[in-house]
Image: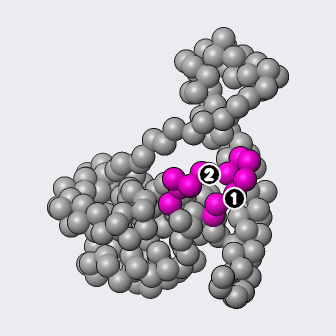
Amino acid sequence: MHGHHSRFADSPFARMGAPGFRRRGPGGRGGDAPPPVDRAEVAGWFAGRLPDGWFTGPVDLVVDRDEITVVGPLAEPDAGEGDPAAARAGRIARFREDTREQRMAIADAAQERYGRSVAWGASCGDVREVFTNASVPVMTRLRQSERLVLDTLVDAGVARSRSEALVWAVRLVGQHADAWLTELRDAMSSVEEVRARGPQL
C-alpha cells in the first residue's frame, strides 16, 4: 500500500476537508455525534494498517460523520479470450472473499478509534464496487413548498415515498453541483487547518 496520495480526493465526498466537521447550534448534530476527526490522520492510519499486497495503488478514502469508506485498486486480471469486464468483476469478488476476516478486524479497530463504521470496496479497471454502505437516517423539517417538491416526485412515480424522493433530490444535487460542493469543502478544509493551528482550550 502506498502512502497518502491525491487520489484520496477523487470521490465527490472525499474532498470534505473536515470529515466529521460538526456545526454546533440549530441544524447541527447533537452531542451523540462522534467527535470530528482529522482526515490526514485517518488516511495515515489506514495506510499503515492495510496489508501491502492488497492494492496496487493508493486507496480512495471517504470520511463523514457516520462512516469511513475505503476503496482500493486491484491488479487487472488477464482475461485471455474471456470478457474483460467479467474478469474484473471476478477479481473484485475474489478479493472480497479472501480478505473478509482481515477487513472485519481492521474495521473493528477503526470503529473503536474513530467512532465510525467502515465500508469496504475495490476497483479493477473501470469496474468499481462498494461492498457495504451504512444507510443512516437523517431527520429534517420541511416547509410546505419543500414537501410539495417531494410529493410531486412521488406522484410522478420517480420515488415511492418522501424519504426516497429526498434521497433522489440529494443525489441529483450532488451530480449537478459537484464543482460548487468541492469549492465549499475546500474552504471548510482551510478553516479546519487554521483552527488546528490555534491555541488549544
Task: Report the front residue among 193 and 154.
Answer: 193
The reply, left or right, for residue 60 in relation to residue 73 is right
Q: Please state the extent of the stretch shown in magenta in the rendering.
A: 21-34
Q: Which residue type carries mark 2?
A: Arg
Q: Do the residues labelled 2 and 1 touch (CB within 8 Å)?
A: yes
Magenta region includes residue 28? yes
In this figure, which residue is indicated by the disc labeled 2?
29
**Which quadrant of the figure has residue 166?**
top right
Residue 85: give x, y in percent of width and height.
35, 51
Q: Residue at x 56, y 55 (%)?
A: 31
Q: Which residue lies furthest to the right in this view?
A: 145
Asked if residue 69 is positioned above or below residue 2 in the image, the reply reads above
In this figure, which residue is indicated by the disc labeled 1?
23
Task: Report the front residue among 183 and 117.
Answer: 117
Mark pair 2, 1: CA separation: 7 Å
The reply, left or right, for residue 8 in relation to residue 59 is right
Asked if residue 151 is positioned above or below residue 19 in the image, the reply reads above
Q: Is mark 1 on a helix, strand or loop?
A: loop
